[in-house]
Amino acid sequence: MQTIKFLMLSITVCFIWSAVPAQQKAFVPDLSKVNDTSMWIVHNRSATFNDGELTLNGKEGDGLVLLKNYSFSNGKIELDIKGKDDRGRSFVGIAFHAINDSTYDAIYFRAFNFRNPERKGHSLQYISMPSFDWEKLRIENYGEYENSISAAPNPNDWFHVTIEVKYPFVKVYVNNAKDPSLQISVLSPHKKGKLGFFVGNNSEGRFKNLKIYAE
């Protein structure tokens, strides 16, 4: 009887253990190596690293910094971002499922709209390049792929971003909010690709603490 009870207990413990999902381990890219061409691809920007922060300069056209030998499909992306309160010159975010520097999905923020009562609905944007830029989406799908941020951050301060990707669905959370600020279904057929930082036309951007939890 003792042996039977022990076996039953062992089976139960094993079942419970196997039913608990393993905690995901974060992949933390080395931002200090941003100008190492064997690790990163820098497109249309100059990148500098100092005191834990990656800074991309502002110039005409969109800019990308992509991990070279890493493919992201589904999972969670966390990082801190800093834009600025300068209208039309602060588009900062994350690119994912990138095939090259012209074909990618991105989630980005317009910091200058965060607390603008007339334009706060344009604070957070999804795009799928090259077919669905922000202008096309705003004209054809107004309000579906952009949104405001509840408890909006100061546009000149750092803010924390969590992006959950489970193709084709994406949720975006700001400053550890309980509810997402944006929920969309991606428009790209690409289910995986490169991942990295995005800055829009004439925009500089600052980034730190990038962590990737892949499923």
Image: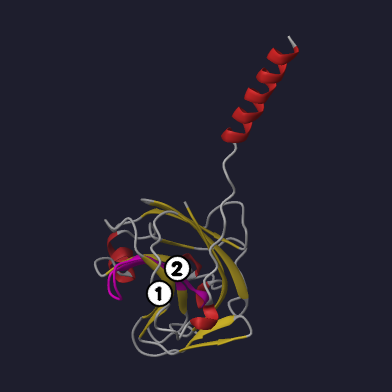
- Residue under label 1, please give it: 66
Crowding near pointer 2: few (<14 within 10 Å), some, many (20+)?
many
- SS type, badge 1: strand
Residue drawn at x 32%, y 55% as measured from the top left: 191
Q: Residue at x 29, y 68 (%)?
A: 99
Q: What residue is shown with label 2?
A: 122
Of the residues shown, which amino acid type is indicated by label 1? Leu
Q: Is residue 209 magenta?
A: no
Tell me, yes or no, if residue 199 can be seen here: no
Element under label 2? helix
Q: Residue at x 69, y 22 (%)?
A: 9
Q: Position of residue 208 (x, y in %)?
A: 58, 75
Query: Front-most of 8 and 201?
Result: 8
Of 120 and 73, the residue lying toward us = 73
Q: Amino acid at mark 2?
A: His
Q: Magenta residues? A: 93-111
Residue 175 visible in the picture: yes
- Front disc: 1 or 2: 1
Across and down, in percent, residue 77 comes to: 51, 61
* Residue occupying the far top of the picture: 1
Which labelled disc corresponds to residue 76?
none
Judged by its main secondary structure, the magenta piece is strand
> How has the structure been colored for display?
secondary structure
- Estimate the spatial distance between the alpha carbons at disc 1 and disc 2, rounded to whole Å: 25 Å
Could you classify mark 1 by the number of other residues whose Cα lies within 10 Å: few (under 14), some (14-19), or many (20 or more)?
Answer: many
Asked if the magenta segment contains residue 100, the reply would be yes
Most distant residue in the front direction: 3
